[in-house]
Amino acid sequence: EDKVVQSPLSLVVHEGDTVTLNCSYEVTNFRSLLWYKQEKKAPTFLFMLTSSGIEKKSGRLSSILDKKELFSILNITATQTGDSAVYLCAVEAADSWGKFQFGAGTQVVVTP
Amino acid sequence: EPEVTQTPSHQVTQMGQEVILRCVPISNHLYFYWYRQILGQKVEFLVSFYNNEISEKSEIFDDQFSVERPDGSNFTLKIRSTKLEDSAMYFCASLEGGTRGYEQYFGPGTRLTVT
């Protein structure tokens, strides 16, 4: 059975710290891995990763995929209180177009 | 900026009643999805829809559920006879697809409460 496991489940950091979130997966015939940020309601898209070793970057957020070891990390540098959210990882298999299997998420709390 | 919209934002219904949740995906998107998130739990895939038919569905999406795109803009999820365990936030999402875009845009959700 396909699995998506995120770690840690939650963490609390101070403003300015760097956080690293992990998403490991087991999926037959991997196609893509997506990261989302969920604040109050709907998830908002952050990154889509399909190739190993290519870092995607957006401001203070970056993400990379390791298809050999079957994981991805999401880094947030110089955290701000507005980064407080649940970060979700979702994986898609090549033979299941659009069927994204989500992990349970990592809750990040950034304190002033 | 284009966005996915959903109505209603909150629906309260009695067990056994039928509900229809409505979504308007982004206009040039080709792929449509329904997810649900039970309070405190993970986002769960329900169904994907492309070219006027279901592409994929999960084990959750049983005979009580159906989806429809009745016109060129709306995408609906119907639950025929609601159960208490159907209480959840239901998210609609759409995706442009092809070479133009793979980003999945989520709507704000409909909170369904079954009493």
Image (cartoon, coloured by chain):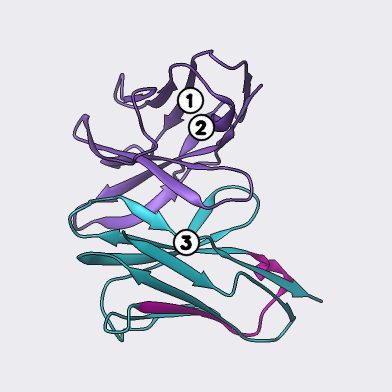
Chain colours: A cyan, B purple
Residue B39 on the magenta span: no
User: Would you call the spot at circle 3 few (<14 residues within 10 Å), some (14-19), or many (20 or more)?
Assistant: many
Residue A106 found in image quarter: bottom right
Instruction: Give the foreground label among 1 and 2.
Output: 1
Question: Would you name the residue on which mark 1 appears?
Answer: B21
Q: Which disc is residue B6 wearing? A: 2
Instruction: Give the foreground label among 3 and 1.
Output: 3
- Does the CB distance between marks 3 and 2 fall below 8 Å? no
Q: Give x and y (percent) for residue A88.
A: 50, 62
> Which contiguous range is marked in magenta?
A71-85
Q: Secondary structure at mark 3?
A: loop
Instruction: Give the foreground label among 3 and 2.
Output: 3
Q: Give x and y (percent) for residue B43.
A: 49, 50
- Rendered position, B106 above or below A110: above
Q: Give x and y (percent) for residue A91.
A: 35, 62
Identity of the amino acid at label 2?
A: Gln
